[in-house]
């Protein structure tokens, strides 16, 4: 059994080795020939997969170690009897902590208190719901926009829904952060969700964060608005046409990073472990005799969270003591110990400034992603709190906090 894995899936060759012959290949550009005689393909977001790609192969399982699935033509694969799956939720915490770092940056730069602001979250799935929960724990107001979830609640007979529409977010939120999938067309279209028309409706100064997909915001329209002096502060982790991005935007936005919001070590490793677990279950259903031949009788050892705990190394900073009660200021200091988006943004700007051609831009964009030194999540840090209330808040926010 030949299993193709993207070479940027941490530990993939180790985890999948018990299940077959693992071949690790670059995801972009992707060489179709490697699929000869392969039965399974594990990709990341940079590899478009459709029936055409698999046409001469025996691949019956495609997994993506990511949350987004817009690079996969799910219908065409299913029509060809290919099982398709993702690692939904694997990097939700990483993205949330990226957004927090952006929020702390803007609060410091523009000298405001996040508790005086309303944050509009567009897309309240794995990322959006963890973000909303953490913001609410800190007493920060949120507005939630998720039409599919709103419909589900109404269909289930709920009288009052907490969800608002996108126009309300545009009108009422001070900060808007996007966490939708990329959906092209249909009732839930998110392609150019923030387009020229919607941008022109932003009357008050706003902060916009996009860590979903570049195409959710019309980048050309955004550039035009920014050039005209519209009062927008912007953080973009994702761009239209990656890796061939429009670098002109960088001169007008506050934070730009090369699609790394989800790249915590935990997030990336979980992407692999979720796929291993799903692939074992798939084999157990269609070819249990193969697993037996491989000497695999107990599936428990392939459980995603078990593998994660087993292989997660100790963090660089493991413990800190908080001398005073937890507040937004001390939280921003704690968060910065683990991750500061400004460092990634500086590096990105530096690399892009020396890119002379479209090819150089694309090459440098991918190189930054490939060589990214993955950060750790808040859960990797023991915070010793001075009081019970701070301790409880830290636990709810995801830190490891032993009782004093
Ligand atoms: N920058 C990065 O590194 C990362 C980017 N992503 C992107 O973020 C997206 C969200 O991630 P998750 O929360 O894990 O996905 P998810 O699928 O759990 O949540 C997406 C939510 O968006 C909602 N939604 C769908 N259409 C909508 C619309 N028109 N307006 C508002 N909400 C809508 C869905 O109902 C769902 O609740 C992914 O699909 C992926 O494209 C995810 C992880 C890392
Ligand atoms: O999970 C997603 O969706 C993402 O956007 C990933 O974080 C992107 O990471 P790569 O798969 O491109 O490394």
Image: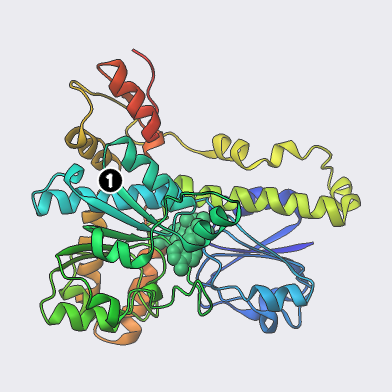
Instruction: Say whether residue 62 is visible.
Output: yes
Towards the viewer: 30 or 125: 125
* Picture layout, residue 34 above or below residue 336: below
Classify residue 349 as left or right of residue 338. Answer: left
Residue under label 1, please give it: 141
Towards the viewer: 216 or 304: 216
Q: How far from the left and from the top, in percent, is residue 95?
A: 39, 53
Q: How many marks?
A: 1
Identify the residue at horizontal 57%, vertical 35% (top origin).
Answer: 310
- The colour scheme applied to this rendered structure is rainbow
Instruction: Say whether residue 374 is visible.
Output: no
Q: How far from the left and from the top, in percent, is residue 98?
A: 33, 52
Q: Is mark 1 on a helix, strand or loop?
A: strand
Q: Quadrant of residue 243?
A: bottom left
Identify the residue at horizontal 21%, vertical 57% (top origin).
Answer: 174
Identify the residue at horizontal 57%, vertical 76% (top origin).
Answer: 48
Name of the residue lying farthest toward the top: 404
**Viewport quadrant of the N terminus:** bottom right
């Amino acid at each position: 059994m030949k299993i193709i894995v993207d070479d940027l899936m941490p530990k993939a060759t180790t985890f999948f080795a018990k299940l077959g012959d693992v071949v690790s290949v670059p995801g972009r550009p992707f060489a179709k020939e490697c699929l000869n005689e392969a039965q399974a393909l594990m990709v990341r977001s940079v590899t478009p997969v459709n029936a055409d790609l698999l046409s001469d192969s025996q691949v019956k399982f495609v997994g993506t170690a990511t949350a987004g699935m817009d690079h996969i033509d799910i219908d065409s694969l299913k029509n060809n009897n290919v099982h398709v799956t993702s690692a939904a939720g694997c990097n939700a915490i990483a993205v949330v902590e990226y957004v927090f770092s952006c929020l702390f940056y803007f609060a410091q730069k523009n000298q405001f208190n996040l508790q005086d602001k309303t944050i509009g979250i567009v897309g309240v799935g794995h990322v959006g719901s963890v973000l909303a929960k953490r913001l609410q724990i800190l007493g920060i107001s949120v507005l939630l926009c998720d039409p599919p979830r709103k419909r589900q609640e109404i269909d289930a007979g709920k009288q009052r829904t907490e969800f608002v529409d996108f126009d309300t977010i545009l009108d009422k939120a001070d900060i808007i952060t996007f966490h939708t999938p990329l959906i092209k067309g249909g009732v839930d279209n998110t392609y150019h969700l923030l387009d020229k028309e919607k941008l022109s409706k932003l009357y008050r100064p706003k902060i916009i964060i996009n860590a979903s997909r570049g195409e959710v915001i019309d980048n050309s329209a955004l550039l035009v608005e920014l050039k005209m002096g519209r009062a927008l502060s912007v953080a973009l982790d994702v761009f239209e046409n990656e890796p061939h991005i429009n670098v002109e935007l960088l001169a007008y936005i506050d934070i730009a990073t090369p699609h790394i919001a989800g790249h915590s070590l935990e997030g990336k490793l979980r992407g692999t472990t979720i796929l291993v677990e799903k692939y074992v279950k798939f084999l157990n259903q269609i070819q249990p005799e193969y697993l037996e031949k491989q000497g695999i009788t107990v599936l428990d050892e392939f459980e995603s969270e078990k593998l994660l705990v087993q292989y997660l190394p100790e963090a660089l900073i493991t413990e800190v003591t908080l001398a005073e009660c937890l507040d937004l200021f001390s939280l921003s200091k704690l968060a910065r110990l683990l991750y500061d988006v400004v460092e990634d943004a500086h590096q990105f700007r530096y690399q892009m400034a020396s890119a002379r051609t479209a090819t150089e831009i694309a090459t440098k964009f991918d190189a930054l992603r490939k060589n990214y030194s993955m950060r750790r999540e808040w859960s990797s840090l023991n915070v010793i709190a001075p009081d019970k209330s701070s301790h409880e808040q830290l636990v709810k926010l995801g830190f490891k906090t032993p009782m004093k």
